[in-house]
Image (cartoon, rainbow, N blue to C red):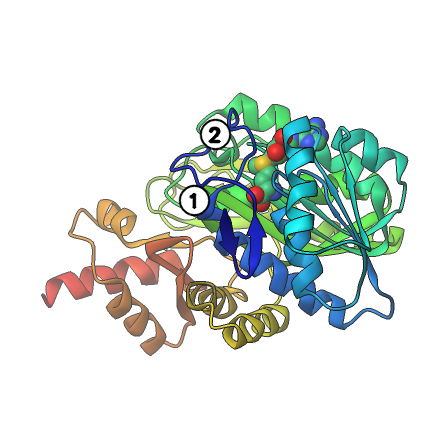
Amino acid sequence: MIEERGTKLDIEAEDEPTKESKVFYNNEMVLNRDISVSALKVYSEDQKVDLKVLDALAGTGIRGIRYFREVPDIEKVTINDSKPDAFENIKKNLELNSLKTKVEVTSRDANLLMSERRKGFHYIDLDPFGSPARFIDSAARSLKHDSFIGITATDLAALCGTYRKTCRRKYGSWVQNLPYHHEVGIRVLIKSVFDALAVHNKVFDPKLCYAERHYYRIMGEVRETKKGVNRSLKNIGFLSFCSGCGYRKFSGEKERVMRECPNCEQDTRKIGPLWTGKIGRKNFIEKVRKSLKEKKLNEAVELTKMLEKEMDIKKPFYDTHNIGKITGQPAVSRDKLIKKIEDKGYNAERTHFSPTGIKTSAPIEDILSISKEMNRKK
Ligand SMILES: C[S@@+](CC[C@H](N)C(=O)[O-])C[C@H]1O[C@@H](n2cnc3c(N)ncnc32)[C@H](O)[C@@H]1O
């Protein structure tokens, strides 16, 4: 038996769970679940009604059970997994946790279930093996006018552009592997979710999105409003970049393509489309962090603290090692670089995307010259 944050599961722990595991449970996703529970709690606090929740790809049902036990204001949780062994395990786990009412267990193909229950849920959790792409359209049908969604993706090689054609096929974007590939990948994922919801006149507003170890997690509000979708189209665009000097710039879908780097005049390249807006809301993340702090979930507190600080800087992060490559000098200390950039009057923060990365709105020429100056004074 396993216990996670007070929820009991009738399952043996596996070192490396795989798709072939009888019932899938991954201990490495506790952080993901901790943050998801607190995010749903924060979302629910602002709602006028009790929530109908769907854990669509449930495995042991740990998410659905934790949502039910840890988030007040839930009317009903539906816990679904198409695999018969998982279905039986979910029922056992409900018994173990003495949950008898307000929880429904189903064993359906998630796409069929969500398509049938049109506008049936205030919150849907999609936590698939690999790519969530094939579930997003049905989730878009199944979400209510005002709702919330949490999506995990573990197919990072596709999203980051290592497998370019897979990225185009599943997510509709052409990207390539860049030194800040995790930020590119998560922005491609958000774009694809935005697009899938837009088809149903629903707008996606990212509230808390992050990259961690082997996965991305995106969580955000969904509202049915054509005007809202149209207004938010400004958040979809392209990224132009220069491999020579590290210059990068987001531009709108309809803007003219920049061909020459304004900094070093080399040819630029373009990837996308991708989400160019904020990937989360500071005030929302702050509330999630406080909820995690109350529960003393320190790892999640640290992650959300970092997210909160970097959230308002949209430009993709810079990696100090990549800056070193560009200048032909050793990489400088991240924290000292942040301090020097701030001394010049720009904002600069650490980023959760990389332990050697910084987020800043400073222009690349300043970042490079500060880095060179730091190397001169070493
Ligand atoms: C990554 S596991 C879920 C892990 C779980 N959410 C957790 O936090 O521990 C993905 C689950 O989706 C189920 N699954 C895969 N395809 C499905 C489908 N089309 N419909 C319903 N369930 C599906 C698998 O049986 C598996 O249990």
Q: Which structural element holds mark 1?
A: loop
Q: Is residue 330 visible?
A: yes
Q: Mark 1 — residue?
A: 261
Give the residue type that dot 1 points to.
Answer: Cys
Q: Is residue 252 visible?
A: no
| Residue at x-position 47% and y-position 67% | 297
Horizontal side of 329 relative to 142 (left or right) equals left
Q: Mark 2 — residue?
A: 18
| Residue at x-position 46% and y-position 31% | 157
Give the residue type that dot 2 points to.
Answer: Thr
- The answer to whether 9 is drawn above or below residue 44 in the figure is above
Residue 99 point in image, percent of width and height: 73, 55
Q: Which structural element holds mark 2?
A: loop
Residue 325 point in image, percent of width and height: 23, 45
| Residue at x-position 43% and y-position 44% | 261
Residue 276 point in image, percent of width and height: 60, 51
Horizontal side of 24 relative to 81 (left or right) equals left
Residue 67 point in image, percent of width and height: 68, 58
Horizontal side of 122 relative to 354 (left or right) equals right
Query: Image quadrant of ligand 1?
Result: top right
Q: CA distance from mark 1 to mark 2?
A: 45 Å
